[in-house]
Amino acid sequence: MVLRFGFLRFRFLRFVRLERRLLAPIVALVLVAAACGSQDEAQDEVSRDACTDPVQAATAIDRDVDVAGTTIRLATHGSFALSDDTLAAFTEQTGIEVEQVGAGDAGTLVSSAILTKDNPTADVLFGIDNAFLCRGLDADLFLAYESPELARVPDEFELDGGSRVTPISYGDVCANYWFNELPADPPTSLDDLVAEVNRGQFVTQDAEVSSPGFAFLLATIAKYGEDGWEDYWRKLLANDAAIAADWESAYRGDFIAGGGDRSIVMSYASSPAAEVLFADPPVDEPPTGVLFDGCFRQIEFAGILAGTDHPAAAAALIDFMLSTTYQNDIPLNMFVYPVVEDAMLPGVFVEHAALASDPLTLDPTTIEQNREDWLDQWAEIVLA
Amino acid sequence: MRPRSGSPLVIGLLPLAFLAAFFVYPLAALFVEGFRFGPDEIGGVFSRSRFWRTAWFTVWQAVVSTAVTLLISLPLSAVVGRYRFRGRSVLLALVTVPFVLPTVVVASAFLASLERLGLADRFGNSAAVIIAAHVFFNVAVVVRTVGGYWRGLDDRPEQAARVLGAGPIAAFRHVTLPRLRPAILAATSIILLFTMTSFGVVLLLGGPRRGTLETEIYRFALNRTDFGTAAVLAIVQLVAVLGLLVVNSWLARRLTQRERRGATARPRPRGRQWLGIAAAVVPVMVFLTVPMSALVERSFRSGGSYSWANYRALTDRPPLLPVDGVTALSNSVRFAVAAMAIAVGVGVAASVVIASSSRAAHLRPSRAERAMGWVLDVGLLLPLGTSAVTLGFGFLVALDEPVDLRPTWIIIALAQSLIGVPFVVRAVVPVLRSIDGHVREAAAALGASPSVVRREIELPMARSAIGVGAVFAFAVALGEFGATSFVGRSPDRMTVPLAIGQLLGQPGQQLRGQAMALSTILMVATIVVIMIIDRNDRAGVL
Amino acid sequence: MTGAGLAVREATVRFGPTEALSDLSVSVAPGEIVAVVGPSGCGKSTLLRCIAGLQPLDRGSVLWDGVDLAMVPTHRRDIGLMFQDHALFEHRSVRDNVGFGLKMRGRKAAERDRRIDELLELVGLGGFGNRAIPSLSGGEAQRVALARALAPSPRVLLLDEPLGSLDRARREHLVGEIRSVLREVGQTALHVTHDQDEAFAVADRIAVMRSGTIERIGTPERVWHDPGTAFVAEFLGHNVISTPEGPAAVPADAYRLVPTNGLEPGPPAVVFDVRFRGDHTVVTVDTAEGERVRLRTGEPTSLRPGDAVGVEIDPERVTPLGEDPNPA
């Protein structure tokens, strides 16, 4: 840190003295940065493969310390929400206060965590999903911790063999449709989206920017394979599908629900439940339905950030996230499903939300290895 | 022999330190510690056709947006600058509102209006929508800057030209326009910066086909976590912006002129003048108010009829937010006030240095003073042209020691003030520069030291300009979204723009109505604040 | 050379290649009013700025009671300064303007109030204290500026074209007023103007400046009657004619017009122009010697351009001029 200051002071004096040659320090900065970059790049490559394999023995976190009175920070994305009394219950049980930081999207969350790895802004991170998982694991963001509560979680959610992250919730990204405005029968498969009858009806999100948008791209890759997905996208675009920037502009802009004129939108399998819960005026049945073919399953994980000063308190929070108090609170606040088997689903979920019986997934390592290429190819198709 | 006490060099240390600590240092730290790149990334970026397409579109849309904004705002500036009439302050306040609306609200209001007008298919996701939204945001910059400057101009040279046989158009072209150049240049440079680096508008309205360098940085840094490419793009952007600023600073110096300023009484318009005013005001106001009123209308719609239900709901915490709307509002105002205070302190100090460094040669600003003035002039504008993502990450990486500011709300105010300072400087410097040298000298002869002259004479004379700068600083802080989203999650940090974003982030008409109610409150609050400040503006800078 | 009062010694100021002041020396005794006149661009204002400390000297010095002021910044020089454009503080009231210098000197509020009232009374603006500056007329603003400059009783008052922006009648009135005010308080002052009438009306001594130096300095009577150089003579409105002894100055009222009957020796003068000026008439004639002279007569005349006329000079009033030290 001291060094960094010295470096800057030097640079800053030149900044002042050189007046018109302001560019010089910037060029110098570029060169310095370039030099650092090329030196360190090699190290970053090492653990690229099989990020989800255990690479280290889980160093046991000493749980015998007195955690009462500590305050820990929880880094999350903007969609994180809980009832008022849920975290209060945790504080009551353990004496640990929880502060939340961060409000960007999932990408911001992971990128920020990687950039601040040496001095993290939080102790626990929640909200990294299977699409970003390897990026986080490769960057050694997390301390290994195997919660005793994991016994209540089905194995299919435990993607990290090294127990560095703990699954907390999951949900399916699926196309939704607006019953009353559909030009034909509700679509039953992804193939229906490229049918002439649905021309100009579908809107999805930018795969480079939006989490459901990227999930849909992954779904098409999972369904049509490395050789077929590009062709599917070309057909989709030829059928006048729209690509909105993010979920908000798709659902609130182009989709009927927001006053748009498209009847099919990429959203979540749980969205109809929200349409009932937040309806105005109240309704008994959601105006929307879900296309259960071609759903991509997102699993969201929590992990203890490696730089934490309070590993025991952080571990306690992870345990709490798997408690029924917390897990029962998930659906109505974040519109995703709890991972523990003994959680209770609220009525509106039971009635109006559903999960795909056969969701699509891709192995996190495969996603990580191909992300750049897939996105480049996707951008080529979309921009063409 | 020049008195050295209270020298601009000493005053300049504050803004210089601010710039160093909260801009240069975070960026440098980010590039050294996180945004690393080597020849591969550089080659990778420049060999992509995508980069060149993006770079071209970035410049093109910025230039067109700026030109269109100027074109439609200049007549409005003339109305505001030359006449005095009932409703003028309401007009000014209305024009300023788009400036504070969070991008996410404007984007959805724009999309909604397009749908209403049946233009969505023709203009959705097109460059035209981006440009229209940029114009919507930036009309305020021109009207406030140029209209305010115009109001302070002595109109005798125009009268002289008219007497010499120039028609109104010739008099405007040959006399008024050249005199307005410093203000027009100031507005142009700010709008160019804004539009070149505008983020939300381009991302939300442009779709994947219309990317700018700014959105590319976002795409690569956040969703691809490809920091190398993001770094190269950020440097390209920074160098381009710096180039723009250097040209701007050079031009500004060439155009600096001594103008007598003062409260010239402005006439009330008469007869045919009303027609001209209507022609200038009505189309712009329609353009500005259609999206705004769509928003207001939606905020009152609840359960198929109109009521206050969405507003009443704000006092309860909605299921998706950590706080209720009222708390979010008070957070927003608190941060914006803090940001405004920082921006005014730093901006006024910087203005004093910049104004005195560019004074006439016989007053002999030293080389060091001139250099400091130049660095501040250009440097303080840089944050406006720096990618929010880069700056946000820079804060996260750098501001952890000696005190970890990152989890505190101070970091929000700091980030917001960084954007606010240029507005204070742009408003105050021209006024300080135009203070007649004799006034300063008379005060000195009466026994006022340079620092007393500054405190007792210059700053009071620039008071209304400082007020205008402060309004802008407050306004941009109120609507700021980018930096806030890095730290703003917890109940005591949740701001209105953030809350609106989250309310719009789930299905359900009720949440949408509440989001619109919050936006409307933000809008009305802005109008009220601006009208109060305008009313107190005695000298008539605005 | 360490006399009491203000002294400027061999002052030189350069603006690039041009010298605004070259080796200029002048002194003002305590209680004395010196007017500096000269055409625009001669360096009058620069001289004032040097004395005020607003303009550094390239060479030379400014002294007060023999003490060099080089290291004393403007605000500690204890001077008054009054500009043509008043330079009033528009954001403050008349009272605050007049009281500003007193406040800077740390005078107590009560004392300030008393002095402000006294000065407003002195300049004839009693009761104007709470007026806003923009509401004042030009003459009123000028009086406020004078009161403001005088309020702290400065060692020396510097007036830079103080009445230039006023109409003639008001200027003449104010000139008299300024003089009586300055006299009343015994104010040492340096008054810069391009208007000789103003200078004559105000000053104990007059200095005529040309290209950065003082070409003539003395009492108004002396300078008027003995201008010394052709430049000063012409600046004062005298005619410069050739005599066998060399150039000489002749005031316009030293001539007498006589009717011509064609019998005089030599050819008559020819009237070129006649200007009626109210209490006198200015007649321009081309003399037989080939010189064009302006003369002034108090009597009504029916002369018209082209008329032949005889011209007589009062030989007492022909003043020989010395060598022009700065030939044009």
Image: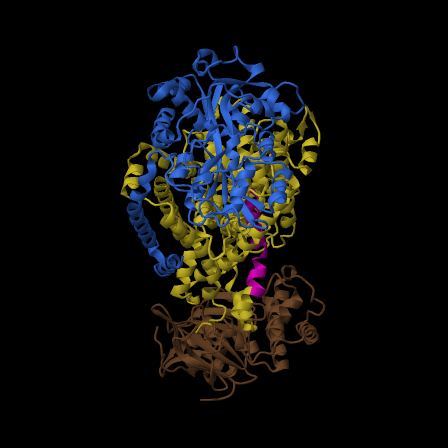
Chain colours: A blue, B yellow, C brown
| B471 is within the stretch colored magenta | yes
Say which residue appears at 31% left-offset and 44% top-offset. A43
Counting from the top left corner in percent of width and height, residue C97 is at 62, 67
* Horizontal relation, residue A310 to residue A208: left or right: right
B22 left or right of A341? Answer: left
Q: Main secondary structure of the magenta part?
A: helix
- Residue at x-position 54% and y-position 64%: B454
Q: Residue at position x 39%, y 22% from top?
A: A222
Q: Work out whether A346 lies above or below B200.
A: above
- Near-viewer residue (A261 or A52): A52
Instruction: Tell which of C28 and A363 is nearer to you.
Output: A363
Q: Position of residue A332 (x, y in %)?
A: 60, 30
Q: Position of residue C25 (x, y in %)?
A: 43, 81
Q: Is residue A172 left or right of residue C107?
A: left
Q: Is residue A73 magenta?
A: no
Q: Which residues are magenta?
A: B455-479
- Quarter in which the N terminus of chain C is drawn: bottom left
